[in-house]
Image (spheres, helix red, strand yellow):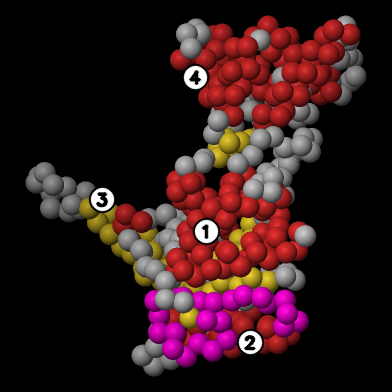
Amino acid sequence: MVHDYPLSNLNRDDLGSPKTVEFGGALRGRTSSQNTKRVTRVRVEEKLGNQALRTRRLPSQVAALLRERGWDEEEAVAAGQAVVMASGIQGLSIGEGGMTSVMLYVPQQVAQELADLVVADRDAVLKVAAHAEAVAKAAADKSKKTKAPSLSKEDKALVKKLQGQVREILSSRNASIAAFGRMLANSSESTVDGAVSVAHTLTTHALVEQPDFFTAVDDIPGEDTGSAHMGSAGHTSGTYYRYGSVNVSELVGNMGGDREAAEEFLQAFLRELAVLVPTAKQRSTAPFTPPALVYLTVRTDQPVNLSGAFEAPVTAKAGSGWTAPSIERLDVHAKAVADFFDKESLVEHGHAGTADLSGVQNLGERIASLGELVERTTRRALELELELAR
């Protein structure tokens, strides 16, 4: 995507200033890949109605569901923590505030499934959780004076069964987890290599931060005539190059071979990524611009990030701004890349956008609408994935 944003602060650093990066010897505006992925993921989940939760508060979520079933506060909290501990995953513990020691990434329904497990066999959950906590303490004792408790044959079978049930629940996945991946140390069954890759966004040209001095006036008049508050905030404006890729074969594999679900996700993801407007400072800058250019490709060899087109910063021509020369630069670079790789590896490409694209020669067929471009590209990618699978 080539996307121009007006005066805005799309993604802030720890001091509240717009993020930047030096590229090609020039300072550029930047938004992080994490920002892009989160905003896109949330919007795709809203569209598909299938949310995933990245959280350390799973025990409290389970406890809340148990309270709804009539459990008292103390028992619900203890059981919520116990069922997570019953997984026996090394390094996963309950820390301050009843939160897990690491962040978990699970489908929304996992809390309900864990609550159901607790209700079905509360005594077993508490027994297995106590054993898991004792094992964790023994492992953490560097003096080796604390030993893990021994179990009877029956209790060993109970631990193994319940651990398997909890781990199966924690390792479940939906479209978001299949696409963006998940890593939980010491739990290989929960780890998923994501099919989506997203680059940090950067401006195609050099820029400088633009300070905005502001004041706020008290609506109730008094003796003083000065402002009630004043401050300064950093902003940038410019034309950004945005890039992401999806390994369609991995996506289908991560979704258990469900190509229909993969198609639904792909269409939602490509559309939301194409029109993305980061959420920071939206209410005070309203940077709701559509992309100038969206270029989609289907390749058989490898992902290709075309940011090299802008290693030398674009300069605005008289009356042109940055967008037109950025599209021209991308068009030229895309041809060089296509010539470099095997011609057969680029099996489909096309473009759409809101800028004047009449001069574009190397970005495939011009498609009138984003929806049509996304649908056509998705269909071809899945057809190709099926061919390769055979």
- Per the rendered image, the range of residues in magenta is 342-365
Residue pointed to by mark 4: 64
Which of the pair 267/327 is nearer the observer?
Answer: 267
Q: Is residue 350 magenta?
A: yes
Residue pointed to by mark 1: 267
Residue pointed to by mark 2: 335
Label 4 CA crowd tier, 10 Å (few <14, some 14–19, many 20+): some
| Number of the front mark, 1 or 2 | 1
- Quarter of image, res 385: bottom right
Label 1 CA crowd tier, 10 Å (few <14, some 14–19, many 20+): some
Q: Callout 4, which amino acid?
A: Ala
Q: Earlier in the sequence, mark 3 or mark 1?
A: 3
| Number of the front mark, 2 or 4 | 2
Q: Give the spatial CA distance, label 2 vs label 4.
A: 57 Å
Q: Give the spatial CA distance, label 3 vs label 1.
A: 46 Å
| Number of the front mark, 1 or 4 | 1
Q: Residue at x 46, y 15 (%)?
A: 68
Q: Is residue 150 visible?
A: yes
Q: Give the spatial CA distance, label 1 vs label 2.
A: 26 Å
Q: Residue at x 79, y 38 (%)?
A: 188
Label 2, secondary structure: give it.
helix
Residue 225 shown left or right of residue 286 in the figure: left
Q: Give the spatial CA distance, label 1 vs label 4.
A: 35 Å
Q: Is residue 284 above or below residue 211?
A: above
